[in-house]
Image (cartoon, rainbow, N blue to C red):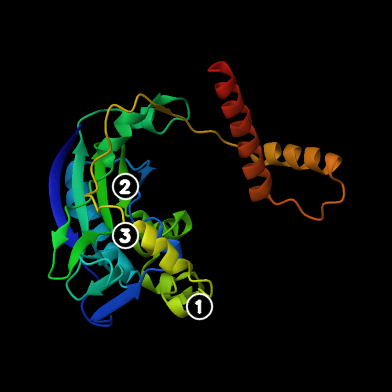
Amino acid sequence: MTILLETCGVAPPPGGILAELSLPLTFFDIRWIHHHPVGSVLFYNHPCSKPYFLETLVPKLKESLSLTLKHYLPIAGNLLYPLITTEKKPVFRFISGDSVSLTIAESENDNFDELVTNHARDADQFYDFMPNMPPIKDETEYKILDVMAIQVTLFPGRGICVGFTNHHSLGDGSSIVGFMHAWASVNKLGESFLTEKGDSLPIFDRSVIQDTLGIDAIFWKSMREIPLKSSQSFPLPTNRVRASYTLNQADIKRLKDFVLTKKPGLVQVSSFVITASYVWALLSVYFYTLSYLFI
């Protein structure tokens, strides 16, 4: 369980940003309109007292988040879902004054070390550290959906957890992780570090995505038939466990050597490809075994 300490909105700093930004959804985004929100939690081994957390860390986190949002305006904005779906399509919109929801909380449980271990543990306990998305709001022609919410939870004297909940259409895993890295960089090194590495900043130019086959219209015709629902909190109990598995450098080398003995003609076997292949192979065996057991 957690104790709510504060709820606020963090906006990009005034000045130096667009007063309004509107981005149409592409076919990469539209297919995720009705998907459940995506959650992520990051744990930091950072022992500190509650006064230090509230008086020093939280203000710095808010300031760095605001500076980061200047480069990620859609995260502070909203998804606009048209009331008349036959005439309009959804868009991401940011207008001056928009903000992302930030919750500050304190854990009542002394289970930080349990949560960060690799062995299987009850998955339900992680949901305390993932914020719920704000409720849907109404505008004249659209329903207004927040696209991200953030929660920072203190484990007194032990560490901190930063939880993210985002609308799936906002971005894939790589996009959201890119935002997390940007925020961490600004918090540690300042905004100048981020602006000097301009190649890592997001690109919002939708013209680079060519839809010559009309996939956008096909996806939207399918998606608009589904009623829009509020993002509900994840139903508990899940009756599931969560575990972490690690492959070190030696493990990956053995896997590469094994593949190359079977396929010596391969020019390059990257660490990502070999890891993904290994995981998929294990999942295939698992699901085949599971289906066999229940025949």
Give, as a three-letter code, the residue at label 2: Val
Say if mark 1 contacts mark 3, CB within 8 Å.
no
Which of disc 3 and disc 2 is earlier in sequence? 2
Mark toward the viewer: 2 or 1: 1
* Disc assigned to residue 261: none
Count up the numbered dots.
3
CB of mark 2 within 8 Å of CB of mark 1?
no
Mark 3 residue crowding within 10 angstroms, few (<14) / some (14–19) / many (20+):
some
Q: Name which residue lies at 59% across and 20% down.
A: 292
Q: Residues under labels 2 and 3: Cα distance?
A: 34 Å
Which residue was labeled with disc 2? 162
Q: N-terminal of the two: label 1 or label 3? A: 1
Q: Amino acid at mark 3?
A: Arg
Numbered circle sitting on residue 224: 3
Q: Position of residue 228 (x, y in %)?
A: 25, 54
Q: Give the percent coordinates (x, y) of residue 183.
A: 36, 61
Q: Quadrant of the N terminus?
A: top left
Residue receiving disc 1: 208
Q: Residue at x 12, y 70 (%)?
A: 140
**Percent coordinates x, y for residue 51 in the rendering:** 16, 46
- Where disc 3 sits, the SS reads loop
Q: Which is nearer the N-term, disc 2 or disc 1?
A: 2
Q: Tag 2's secondary structure? A: strand
Between circles 1 and 3, the one closer to the viewer is 3
Structural crowding at the residue carrying mark 1, measured as other residues with C-alpha within 10 Å and reported as few (<14), some (14–19) or many (≥20): few
